[in-house]
Amino acid sequence: QVHLVESGGGLVQPGGSLRLSCAASGIIYSISAMGWYRQAPGKQRELVARITSGGRTNYADSVKGRFTISRDNAKNTLYLQMNSLKAEDTAVYYCNLEQFGLDYWGQGTQVTVSS
């Protein structure tokens, strides 16, 4: 079993920054990729950023140049640095881990961008 715990969400003003963290624990043998997804009220969950075991990254067009995904393999921790936040970034952000063809999810952390 894999357990993911997100942290770092909160309320921030437009133009501000937040850093999300996701700590992975449990039976972790060979992670294929980890990523951040988000879901705003009334909308489907969408990919924000993803990083493979080889370090390849991809981002949603809406966050390119503003968000940076990274991971500390020694700590099994995933990060998302979010800069120049906009109101439309408001959502619950979920951590995802892919291993042996299975997807694991965290409980989510709320990010609210508002003045």
Image (cartoon, rainbow, N blue to C red):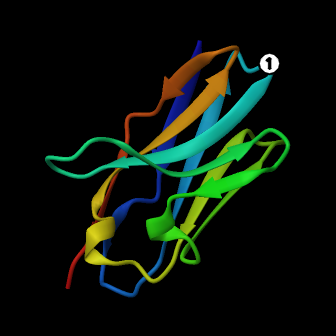
Q: Residue at x 45, y 83 (%)?
A: 84
Side of 34 where 75 appears, left or right = right
Q: Is residue 94 left or right of residue 110?
A: right
Seen from this angle, which residue lies furthest front?
61
Residue 96 horizontal side relative to residue 88, left or right? right
Q: Residue furthest left?
A: 42
Secondary structure beneath label 1: loop
Residue 59 percent coordinates (x, y): 58, 58
Amino acid identity at mark 1: Tyr
Dividing the picture into quarters, in which one does residue 53 lie?
Answer: top right
Q: Identify the image quadrant of residue 97.
A: top right
In the image, taking residue 71 as reference, residue 89 lies left or right, namely: left
Residue 74 in picture, x, y percent from top left: 84, 42
Q: Which residue is mark 1?
A: 29
Q: Which residue shows up at 21% across the image and 47% down it?
A: 43
Q: Name the image quarter holding the C terminus.
A: bottom left
Q: Nearer the viewer, residue 102 or 80?
A: 102
Sort mark 1 into few (<14), some (14-19) or many (20+) by Cα contacts within 10 Å. few
The location of residue 82, given as percent across then percent down, is 51, 71
Q: Residue 30 placed where, x, y %?
A: 80, 22
In the rendered view of the protein, which quadrant contains the N terminus?
Answer: top right
At 46% from the left edge and 59% from the top edge, which residue is drawn? 8
